[in-house]
Image (cartoon, rainbow, N blue to C red):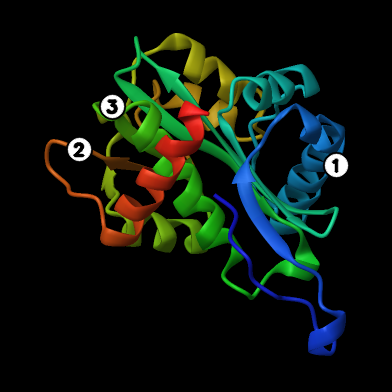
Amino acid sequence: MNTNELVLDKPMEQQDQLTIQIANEGHLKYVHTILDTIEAAAKVRGTGIAKRSPEYLELKIKEGKAIISLVGREFAGFCYIESWGNKQYVANSGLIVVDKFRQHGLAKKIKQHAFSLARAMFPDAKVFGLTSGAAVMKINTELGYMPVTFAQLTDDEAFWRGCQGCVNYDVLTRTDRRYCICTAMLFDPEKQKDKKEVKDLIKDIKKQLKK
């Protein structure tokens, strides 16, 4: 599931190869870089972030539930998935792209891969996400997500505890978890169909998951 795309502003013969793939144990060395990049981006945007521990991200990588992008050996972007509510829901979280690799459509490609991974591993689950970023909302919409109320998301307490690390958590608690700064978006496989590019990625991912 490698996607080759040259994105660096160098002469063609000097450009490095960009790859997007399911993360594996060989990528554990990037965990702290990923967390630092996510936190730095949140500070720049002035938005909240649900913090994750290095151990948590390491687990997602070992479980084959994460997508990583590299340019050569340099970290470029990341996203992971997690199931909730007895696998009835799946969330895409932690989407991040390093500043120098933005403006090339990389976030969209990583999100497509993460979404396709979720659809391949949990085909009957509803896929959802919480975001305060307009760019991510646009990507979600293109994938078939619809804005929904928080009541339409999982009621799994373990998921909502993950929001405790966000600076806006008090908003969530004050409203009895009805809404927050983030927008809730949901893809329901019973109501929405996968786009062709997603179907192609799902086939590719399924092959890799069988290896």
Dot 3 lies on which element? loop
Mark toward the start of the polypeptide (3 vs 2): 3
184, above or below 4, in the image:
above
Label 3 or label 1, whichever comes before in sequence order: 1
- The kind of secondary structure element at disc 2 is loop
User: Closest to the observer: 34 or 155?
Assistant: 34
Residue topped by disc 3? 125
Direction left: furthest residue: 191
| SS under mark 1 | helix
Q: CA distance from mark 3 to mark 1?
A: 30 Å
Q: Are marks 3 and 2 in contact (CB under 8 Å)?
A: yes
Q: CA distance from mark 1 to mark 2?
A: 34 Å
Q: Residue at x 63, y 24 (%)?
A: 60
150 sits left or right of 136 in the view: left
What amino acid is at disc 2? Pro
Q: Residues within 10 Å of mark 1 (few under 14, many from 20)?
A: some
The image quadrant of residue 18 is: bottom right
Badge 2: how crowded within 10 Å, few (<14), some, or many (20+)? some
What amino acid does circle 3 point to?
Ala
Residue 18 sits above or below residue 176 on the image? below
Say left or right for 165 vs 183: right
Rendering coords of residue 167 (x, y %): 67, 34
Whether residue 179 can be seen here:
no
Q: Nearer the viewer, residue 75 or 176?
A: 75
Badge 1 amino acid: Thr
Determine the residue positioned at 41% across, 17% down: 84
Decide if residue 196 is on the left or right side of residue 111: left
Q: Which residue is mark 2?
A: 189
Q: CA distance from mark 3 to mark 2?
A: 7 Å
Residue hosting label 1: 33
